[in-house]
Structure formats: structure tokens, C-alpha cells
Image: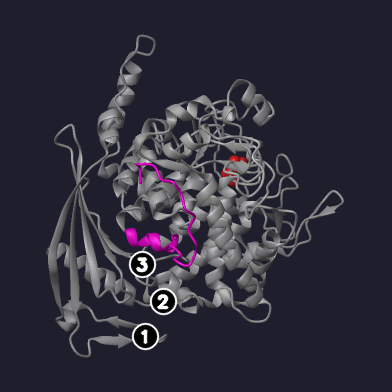
Amino acid sequence: MSKMQRDFLNDAKEAEAAPPPALTNSFSAVDGDCPEKKSLSDNEPKLVASSPGSKEHSSIFYSTTDDLSEVTSVDLTISEKSSTDFIVIETSKCTVEPKENDSESLEDGVSIKKDSSESGEIVKPEKVQKMVRLQSNENMSDNVNLPKAMSLKPCPSVGTSLEIYDYVMRSNGGGGENNGAAMMEEAWERLKKSYVYFKGKPVGTFAAMDPMAEALNYNQVFVRDFVPTGLACLMRDPAEPEIVKNFLLKTLHLQGWEKRIDNFTLGEGVMPASFKVLSNSHQQKETLIADFGGSAIGRVAPVDSGFWWIILLRSYTKCTGDYTLAERPEVQRGMKLILNLCLSDGFDTFPTLLCADGCSMIDRRMGIYGYPIEIQALFYFALRCARQMLKPERDGKELIERIDKRITALSYHIQKYYWLDFTQLNNIYRYKTEEYSHTAVNKFNVIPDSIPDWVFDFMPLRGGYLIGNVSPARMDFRWFLVGNCIAILSSLATPAQATAIMDLIEERWEDLIGEMPLKISYPALEGHEWRIGTGYDPKNTRWSYHNGGSWPVLLWLLAAASIKTGRPQIAKRAIELVEQRLSKDGWPEYYDGKTGRYVGKQARKYQTWSIAGYLVAKMMVENPSNLLMISLEEDKKIAKPKLTRSASF
Ligand code: GLC
């Protein structure tokens, strides 16, 4: 093991041992509280550190033991010499041999190893094991046009101006390392400027700070938009958890409001979509105003807000080790109210959650009413996070039992019925219809003729994904990025499915990443489908906004998913693309066009989550152990559906 690798292992152990608020051993404090701690951590490979290395070479360190006594290093070498790309994965397993008395006990009884330089422990490579050569990324390097510094060809109509633009891009760094550092600096500055204060304390961030556009509701703090900001603050070194805590408590307070729309009252657990601070300078008074969907376009309550709130609460607890926040009675109550909304008995025959269109990040009609994957994945993620944080006292035990049952049912349903790859597509294509009784194969009576033509071309032999929606006689075959990445992060997707999703992203790089990461949905609804699906929405025209537009904020989700699946090079390539344009374009909210080339028709500039998403992606690539704040290991207790798998597995 090289010195650099040793240093990283030592760093990782120091990080584990350091007191909060850094990434600490109390990192597992929440897990420690959790009755299912064992199943969550036992023998699961954990990412403990990474060496950023160079673009061509980097290392990741995994451990299957809590005390990091056994660490496996994975060297990723991307060779770009020939037309066939290889990733050389070199694995070496190291055993840290403890000397006597080399461990210290921490308050919560977790034993950690002392720094090796102090204790003189021997880090001994057990065997320098295998060199696996994977033929991979053919599509990324050969078929995909990924300009290093985007070279624009002058065309007669614009002539030299494009050359100048090209020159400016190159001389500004065009995505190089310097540009990355400068962008990080700029991003932090802009993020700070977007802070919203209430009674002198930061409680969130404006959605956008575009001096050239009408504010509308972009001067509010959106719950979903704040998540990447919150993560950026937690991942920063040193962490800045205060704003996250304030945000969590303020939104919790707002949850307690009575929510009325016309004469109808919403469920107690509903979290706001957004809030703003009203200042009356005359009376020197500040008040909060929240929107629970009553002011939103389409008057839809945000189903995702409560889930994101629970997920961020876990990230906060993981990062800081401050689990007193999650344990507060009002916080426990807030979690329970959110979950009660989703776990109540009804007429459902599916474990998925029935939703109105426009109840999530895609907050306008886009034909996703029913059981959209984004909400189902967030639901699952929130259930598992809450499962770690809920205390079994009083009614808690019964709720935990309901959560366990739902986790099992939901993962079975999604893994089995939402999964689409080449084999499964072929199965559906050959479905018989009108089948009755329990022996039915085509359970939802999907008519094969309803499979859109584009899927047959889009589906690679290698790869697969969770489709957009499943309900009686309906499968929405569209790709939605958020749902798929959240499914990976929460381990809703099986490891094999997670790998196949990343395969698909590589295989369909041009469609899903294009020139500016990252397509929110694919493909766009056009013509008649657009008229029916969006209700003639002029903002969601084809390849724009939610309808096949490209959203830079999604970079952090891609980065997290690619690191979790051991494919950090995907994140790096996407970041390179972002670094070529995002700052120069003024951090737009979204891009339009099939490849995402154009700044979106109505995109705000200086959109806060575009800025925060970039920061989070960078910090995860630079220090993959940050992933632990937003990722869950596979829950081995959950029964797995039997699937016919395609060759992609
Ligand atoms: C748009 C987006 C929504 C986001 C909001 C604020 O409405 O669709 O997801 O939360 O802007 O940025």
C-alpha cells in the first residue's frame, strides 16, 4: 500500500475518531440508537475514504468492519490510450493489526483505533489481490461527444463572436482544475448571499437571486431547494450545521399551522412547499408566511417536502452526531405526523403512494399523477431514515412495525413492477392481456401496444431503469432522474439494479447528460402527448423545463449515485461539463434543448440549488466519505422479488 493510501486510511480513522461536528464516530450515533443497527451495518462494505488522485487515477477505500480494521482499497485507473477503454480495478485488502491498548473507548462505547503514527500499528497488505480488467465505458469515450473544452465551430451567421466565446472559455479555464477552484469559491460566496435570516439567524436560502427577473415566489425558501444547500453546509470542512438546524426547526414549526385551502383543511403532517420572512421595518417585526400548496400553481400540496425534511434531519444527525435534535419530542412528533399521512389505511391495493400531478420537484402538470417514481423513492428513503431515528416509546413501537411492513412491501413492488431492462421490455412486449386470477403474469393488464416506440430504441442491451409510473393498464416508460438516483441512494434499487441504472446512464450519455447535465426526464412529451399530458403548458414545451429540460441541480444526485455504485468517473465527467458553462451562464435554473445546450426559456439566473448542487457534487467527489451523510446501505432483511434478469446483470 502506498504512502498516500496509508495517509488516507489514517485520515479516515481520524475523521471517525474526531469529535463532532466533523465526520465522526458519532456518525453512527443514529444507527446506534436504531434497533436495527445490526442489519444496517453488519458486513456491509462501507466507504471510508478516497484519494482524489488525478482525473485518470483515483482510489476508494471500503471497509466491512466498523473499526476499519479491514480495509479494501480500490484503485480506479481510466486508460484513454486506445479506442477501447479499460478501467483497471486493483484491489488490495489491508489488515490493521492492533497493538495492545491501542484502542480508546468513546462515550457511547464505540471503540476506535488510535492514529497509526502514534500507536505504531502495522498496516499490512494481506495480499495484493486481483487486477480486474473491465472493458467498459466504450460508449462514454467512443460514441459520446464529450468536449474537453467545448469547441464551438464558427458558423457564417455569427462568425467571430463564437470564436471569441470559445477563446474566453479556454482562457478562463474551460472546466480545468483552476476553473473548478474558482467556481467553488464563487459558489460559496453566492450561496452565503442567498441566506434568509429570521430574527438574526439563518433559516434557509432564497430559491433564486436573479436581479433581472421578477421574483414571483423565487424569493421564498423552498423545502426541497434547501436540501442541497443544507448538504453543502454539512459537507463543508468544518461543517456549518447551524443553518440546517434552524431550517429544520422553523419548518417543523410551520407544520403546526392549520392549513386551509378554501373550506378544506389539509392533513396535520403536511410540510410547507416554501416559506418567506416578511419584515415590517416600521414595527421592527418579522413574520413567517408559509405556502402549503394554497398559492402554488395548480394548488397542489408538496408530497416531497416532508420526506426531504426527514432525510435532511438524518443527514444533520449523521454529520454532527447531535441526535438530541431528532430525539426532541416535537421533532419525533413531526416525523410521526408526516408518516401518518402516508401509512394510513385506505382503498389502496398497492404499497405505493397515490399522488396528484405536480406534487414534487416537477410541480406542474406533467402526466405524472398516480404513483410517480420520484415520490415512491423519496417515500422509501424517508421511511428508512425515520426508522433509524424514531424512538419506540409510547405509540412509536406500533408505528415502527407499520414502517417495517411498508418498507418490505414497497421495495418488493418497486423492484418488481417498476424495473425495466431489455429482458423485461421483451416480456412486456409479449404480454397476454385480460388475465384473471392469481396466476396472471400481466398483473396490471398493460396492453403491449401502449409501449411507445422510443423505448425500443432507447433500451440498451446493458442497463435498465425504474420507470416513471405504474398503475392499472398504465406504465409510464419515461426516465426520471430524481427517482432513479434516490432509489440508488436509499438502496431501494437492488445493487444489481443500481449498477444497471449507471450502465444505462453511460450507454445513453448523449440523451441523459448531453452538453449540460442533467435531464430531469426523458424523452420530452410532444404534440398530442404534450397537449394531453401537460394540458397545453407553454412552460413545459418539448425539451424545456420539466419536460426534458436539463437541471444542473441534479448533478449532486448523479454524483452521489455514481460514487455509491463505485463509478466516480461518471460524476467527474459530468462535473467537467458543468464547469465549462454553469458559472459563465450565471448559474441558471435549467437548460433547454435535446442536449441541454440553451439556457432555459424562463430559467432564473443565480438559482441557489444550481449553486449548491455543484458544491455538493464537488465535495463528494473530493471526499467520497461525504456520501455517508446521504446514503443508506442495503437492508438485508427485506425480501427480494424474483426477477428474470437481462444480460446487463
Ligand atoms: C420551480 C421548480 C420547483 C422548485 C421551485 C423553486 O417551481 O419546479 O421544483 O422547487 O421552482 O426553485
The residue located at (65%, 52%) in the rendering is 350
Q: Could you tell which of marks 1 and 3 lies nearer the N-terminus?
A: 3
- Foreground mark, 3 or 2? 3
Measuring 50% from the left and 36% from the top, which residue is drawn there? 590
Where residue 44 is drawn, which disc sits there?
3
Question: Local crowd at mark 3 within 10 Å, few (<14), some, or many (≥20)?
Answer: some
The structure residue drawn at horizontal position 61% and vertical position 52%, both measured from the top left corner, is: 304
- Is 181 rendered above or below residue 41? above
Q: Residue at x 66, y 30 (%)?
A: 534
Provide residue 558's location: percent of width, then percent of height: 41, 47
Viewer-proximal residue among 292 and 145: 145
Q: Tell whether 533 sits left or right of 419.
A: right
Q: Earlier in the sequence, mark 3 or mark 2?
A: 2
Identify the magenta region.
624-649
Residue type, numbered disc 1: Leu
633 inside magenta stretch: yes
In which image quadrant can residue 636 be found? bottom left
- 56 horizontally vs 42: left or right: left
Say which element carries label 2: helix
> Residue 524, position in %: x, y?
54, 29
Q: Residue under circle 1? A: 106
Q: Which of the pair 303/597 is nearer the observer?
A: 303
- Measured in 3D between alpha carbons, the distance from the residue under mark 1 to the one under mark 3, in whole angstroms, is 22 Å
User: Mark 2 highlights which residue?
Assistant: 26
Residue 307 picture quarter = bottom right
Kind of residue indicated by mark 2 = Ser
Q: Quadrant of the N terminus?
A: bottom left
Q: Amino acid at mark 3?
A: Glu
